Amino acid sequence: MLLLPLLYSTLLLLVPVSASPDLLPSPAYNTSLLWGPYRPNVRFGIRPRVPQSLFMGIMWYNFDVGHKSRGIELPQPTDRQYGSHITDLRHTCENDSIQASGYGWTAYDPRVGGTQLIPDPTNKINITTEFVKISEGQNRGNWGARVKVTPREDAPPGLRTAMVFYVGMEGMENCSTCRLGATEGRTTQRDDHAVRKTVFWTKHPQLGISEIHLLIPKHEFAAVKSLNVTEDVLWQSKGLYVELLKDNAIFKDGQLVLPNELGKGNAHFVQMVFSGPFEAEIIYNSHESTMEMTPLDITTEMEKAVDSFQTRFGYVFPPTSPFDTEAHQEFGQSALSNLFGGLGYFHGDLQVDGVDPIENDERESNFWEKLEEARKQAEPKTLGPYELFAHTPSRMQFPRGFLWDEGFHLLLKLPWDADSALDILQSWLALMDSDGWIAREQTLGPELRHQPPGEHQEQSQAIANPPTLFWVVSQFIDILTGKVEYSGHESKYLEQPDQSDALLRRMYPLLKRHYEWFRRTQSADVEAHSIPRASLSEGYRWRGRTPNGNLASGLDDYPRAEPPDPTELHLDALCWVGVMARILTQIAEYLERDSDIPTYQTHLKAITHNIEVIHWSEQHNQYCDTRVYDDTHDYYCPKGYIALWPLITGFLGPNHPHLNASLNLIRDATILWTDYGVRSLSPDHPAYMTAGNYWRSPIWVNINYMILSSLHRLGTTPGPLKIRCRAIYRELRYNLITNAFRNYQASHSVWEQYDAETGQGQQTQGFAGWSALVVRIMAMPTLEGDDREGVRERFLGAVQDAKERRGVSLSAVCVVLLLGACLYRGRRRVGGLVRRVVRRWGGGSSRGRREVGG
């Protein structure tokens, strides 16, 4: 029996492995990011960033309770119906008692690893997972994982838990050199003889030859079942295990367990049954590595990983007052760890609806009905296969890549690990088609398509999404040029200017292509609005609009004019085009593409002009979406996030005439201001808190972050409203973080959104996507200190405020202010005059009294 592992590994070595560099991961796939818990949809799932390769994970359940069918003990082990009714079998991230308990990573850096806590009140256990890596230059490196199970305080005596470790290899049907097999491991002098070892031997063209060791205590029960399944069901690990119990289980010690049948196959399941606390270790060793990973290495490297994470957090995101406490630091580390822990590698095909975007350009009335009919008639298409390395907004609800979310995610990743952030950015840009389109939601492969509703599975090639990825490039250039300090991981792009220049030269044409696609496909009919001063080339409308819905904009159910109309001009879409034009100008200047700069500047000038002449409503004193209604240019003006878009995308400078009106929207408690953050819609709107109430009142961290960033910019730039911006900034920052922190203390989670009336976290718990921006907000400057301002700024601020008041004479206000200013400027002379008068009057009286008294 001891000769089997040696024999099997020898046979593997006899099969040649291609070492061709073109088959290996690109340099961006450097070894420290090759492996990871890159299956965020499961509680603990590991895979490399290599398509059609290895994947593995764990499942567990209460062994005594789990083998009951709807709560009834099965009298005969031959009854095969129990298999489909295993209760509380944990595998994927779901809305269960684990979710409610606030599970997640407590310290995790994708470069080195970290630790995760999974409380399971239903199964009466707590699980801790640890994952660490040892990297060796450009070879594959090794990694180790440890799973520790501890009964909870309310666990019954003798609690038995079943844990399942599984490993599979994709693509073996079409890979003649791929191998995966399981054997009983040999015990060597260095091994703990109280440990049972199961060895999985693997061979893959890109990963080479490797061994996976599963180490568990010998006194516990364990059985390994090896099998071959078809590729279409290989990913269904939970279902396969249930079917194994249903069709292959044997009766042992009063329970049904798997038979111990080891061998070759593309899927292997290890069933472990234990009482009380339990610990298992999974170790991956590549034959190309010079240092073998050991259980001791997991312990030592884990300590290093946690320490380095906490230290780096203090360098990169140090919380500032009043959030510079240990409790707030723990809050921030948890939020950041869970954003990083949601990083996943996905591969597979992408389904699109097959509708021709040119034939269905949504320029007729009731276009959404015609488009829906076209979708029914069209034959869906499959594109790809693609690969994507991306963060996920939520491991439970949204365990896949979302285009506009990723820009927010990378605002946190870039200062922490620039090369990793740029790696992810390149992965997204690689999805772009020849026209410039990137799908807004990436449901790659059958495993991802298994979860979301049907309407989110097929993508439309006419649908855009806010281009937040452009921000990442802009901030990277700011780091390169020294405008922003960088204190994250070592970066080859920052240490080697030729590498950063080459990267920007590769990305620039793709960003330019996406910009041109957006301008072309989301263009709108400005001419129909008959505004003589407007630029006819700069108006945009999100495609894919439906009654009460606009997924493309990212603000799904935020109120728009109803019914949808082909003459609509969407303010936020125009602003996003302006953001792209501004950043492309920045890139072109950096790369010295002088011939491109005038084009972007012309676009940007026209966009800035149209924001004012098309979207500003004097009547409503705010920015608005517009449409043609009764042959007239008409404004649709909900008081909410969209009205702030020119401010939060950088189009309102410190002296802008409409800045104060935007600040009024933010700070008015009857409109958007709350004690918990800026809400998405004013209570005076009929849609407030109606229907799904997704973007119809709740407080969103990402938009509040954009507001705070703009207030910080304006609060640190001379202008008449500088002091007001600083004051709102401080108060909003305090309110937002205080509320998010209060919710974290109660639930150990950040939330997708927060209730506008109570501040309570709602929708998705554990939404560690853009809600993790609380980390950057806590690290923002306090802007405390000297708020004194000059007379000129006070005067201009008062004039600005007076212009917007109703029923107050501006000329009268100006006269009063001018007199006040003159008095202030001449205060010393006036003061001296008054003192002389007083002394003269007072002196005369005194003399008179003395004379009388004499």
Image (cartoon, grey):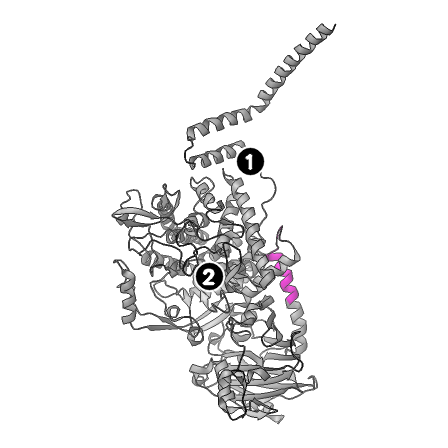
Report the residue at 66% width, 68% height from top: 304
Residue 15 visible to an observer of this rendering = no
Q: Is residue 577 left or right of residue 737?
A: left
Return the x and y of residue 541 as percentages of the image width and height.
33, 55
Kind of residue indicated by mark 1? Glu
Crowdedness near tag 2: few (<14), some (14–19) or many (≥20) residues, C-alpha within 10 Å: many
Q: Is residue 701 left or right of residue 273?
A: left
Circle 2 sits in a helix, a strand or a loop, which is it? helix
Q: Amino acid at mark 2?
A: Asp
Mark 2–mark 1 CB contact (< 8 Å): no
Task: Give x and y (percent) for residue 450.
Answer: 43, 75
Mark 1 = which residue?
789
Residue 311 is covered by the magenta coloring: yes
* Magenta extent: 306-323
- Observer-nearest of 736 and 605: 736
522 and 210: which is toward the camera:
522
- Which numbered marker is on residue 760? none
Does 32 sit left or right of 427 as displayed? Answer: right
Looking at the picture, how far across and down is residue 464, in whole percent?
A: 37, 60
Instruction: For the C terminus, give its image quadrant.
Output: top right
The mark nearer the N terminus, 2 or 1, is 2
